[in-house]
Amino acid sequence: MLDAVREDEDVAGALGINVVYVRVMAFAIGAALAGIGGALYGHYMLFIAPDHFGILISITVVLYLILGGVNNMWGPALDAAVMTLLPEVVRSIADWRTAVFSLAIILLLLVRPEGPLAFRTRSARALPSPRKQQ
């Protein structure tokens, strides 16, 4: 159902899927998981301050999401490898680290919006089907 709503809301609604309910439930489940993660993080750290969550942490989380890809088994493995090595590589240019990460996000979104390892199925579906010759 989530795939149907993501691809085309009108078609999903025509098929009898309650689009508003699916979207609200997806938001609620995501918010609940984020809340549980925040509670566990707070319990682990014993103290939470606003400076624990800088812009670099937000950029890193978005980069995790982009590198992981959609419906991809190898995306999280690539994500773990790259996000372990990338901060170490750019540590020498600490002043430019945020700019490097931001540029990486923009380039990945422009070049591979479905993730770096995802197959290009949408463009393949857009091609016309071959006609049978009679």
Image (tube, grey):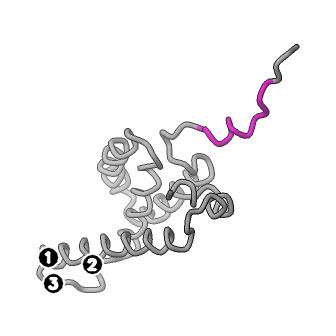
Furthest residue to the top? 134
Q: Amino acid at mark 2?
A: His
Residue at disc 1, secondary structure: helix
- Give coordinates of residue 17: x percent, y percent: 56, 63
- Give coordinates of residue 91: x percent, y percent: 33, 57
Furthest residue to the right? 134
Front-lying residue, 40 or 122: 122
- Quote the CA–CA distance across marks 2 and 1: 10 Å
What residue lies at 68% left-to-right and 40% top-to-bottom? 123
Q: Amino acid at mark 1?
A: Met
The residue identified by callout 1 is: 45
Task: Indicate the quadrant where residue 44 lies.
Answer: bottom left
The residue identified by callout 2 is: 52
Crowd around label 2: few <14 · some 14–19 · many ≥20 (10 Å): few
What residue lies at 45% left-to-right and 63% top-to-bottom? 96
Q: Is residue 130 above or below residue 54?
A: above
Q: Is residue 45 left or right of residue 79?
A: left
| Quadrant position of the C terminus in the picture | top right
Q: Which residues are magenta?
A: 120-130
Looking at the image, tell me whether mark 2 or mark 1 is earlier in sequence order: 1
Disc 2 and disc 1 in contact, CB within 8 angstroms: yes
- In the picture, the disc for residue 47 is 3
